[in-house]
Amino acid sequence: MRATLRRTLGLAWVVPALVLVGVFVYLPLVQNLQFSTLKWDIYSGSQEYVGLDNYTKLVDDPVFWSSLGNNALYAVVSIVFQVFGALLLAALIEGVRSQRWQRALRAIYFIPSAISLTVAGLLFYFIYEPNLGPLNHALRAVGLGELAQAWLGQESTAMSSIIAMSQWQGFGYSTLLFAVAIQRIPSEIYGAAAIDGVGAVGRFFRITVPLVREMTGLMAIVTLSGAFQVFNEVMVMTAGGPNNSTQVLGTWLYRSGFVRNNFGYAAAIATVLFVITLAVAVAQLWVTRRRRVEW
């Protein structure tokens, strides 16, 4: 009787949370899938069922594919810098003998992460400004004036400039999380390796990398998911221009729905975006579970 009562009370606490998740997460997903089969004018309210036509249009839409390519490029660069680069930097910081310097370095690298993406985008919009921006002034000051250009005004440099800003903004946060993971590794393991004559590089690859793989998997999930959900920095800095060269799935979704007034097509883009991020998360969780670290 008591066990049954406990289970009943437990369900009483769980059910409200399940209802909230169902209403605010799963119901919108189902509704979005339904919307993606419509041709929907959100201003007049007119709706027309078109089946899978919106998905067919996606296949033939060059901007959709270039947006997906920009997201993929964003993801690759983010994995390199915010996962592997951050892990290396965290190991270097934790290798500093002085705790005072460790704390100072963590704070220095974390400060950019405390700045909102919108503010960081506006800051770099000014830095990249071709006439008044400090980047071109610095290049001219050191004799590299031929490299000065309109960084956000050219198709060849606009996307890479946005990606550079986002890496600067998010690098410190990843580094701090990896630093916490490294601190959990017993110091005796490093001490034993040092006694056996293993150098700093060997300790990094043989001890640090294997023992923080759970954090590595988590950061890979967060980084990849974030790379396919990019929106703020692109909207603030270029709004998808010039000539749609910096469109990502998030901005193309917004423009399709609220500028071009094709909400059904925007819902189809959102469905593709959801499938991609879900697939990435499931794959990473599966890999992480198989490689779980036990102390």
Image (cartoon, grey):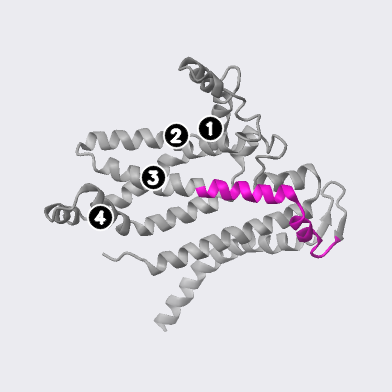
Q: Is residue 41 left or right of residue 142?
A: right
Distance of mark 3 from mark 2, alpha carbons? 14 Å
**SS label for mark 2:** helix
Q: Which of 221 and 16 is in front in this view?
A: 221
Instruction: Check the picture and name the quadrant holding the C terminus.
Output: bottom left
Labelled pair 3, 2 in contact (Cβ < 8 Å): no
Main SS, magenta region, reads: helix
| Residue range highlighted in magenta | 49-76
Instruction: Give the residue type at disc 1.
Output: Ala
Residue underneath mark 2 = 112
Residue underneath mark 1 = 120
Q: Residue at x 74, y 49 (%)?
A: 62
Q: Residues within 10 Å of mark 4 (few under 14, many from 20)?
A: some
Instruction: Give the residue type at disc 4.
Output: Ile
**SS label for mark 1:** helix
Q: Residue at x 70, y 46 (%)?
A: 252
Residue 65 lies within the magenta run: yes
Distance of mark 4 from mark 2, alpha carbons? 27 Å
Q: Which of 175 and 72 is in front in this view?
A: 72
Q: Which mark is residue 242?
A: none
Labelled pair 4, 1 in contact (Cβ < 8 Å): no
Labelled pair 1, 2 in contact (Cβ < 8 Å): yes
Residue underneath mark 3 = 86
Q: Position of residue 19 (x, y in %)?
A: 59, 65
The answer to whether residue 9 is seen in the rendering is: yes
Residue underneath mark 4 = 185
Distance of mark 3 from mark 1, alpha carbons? 19 Å
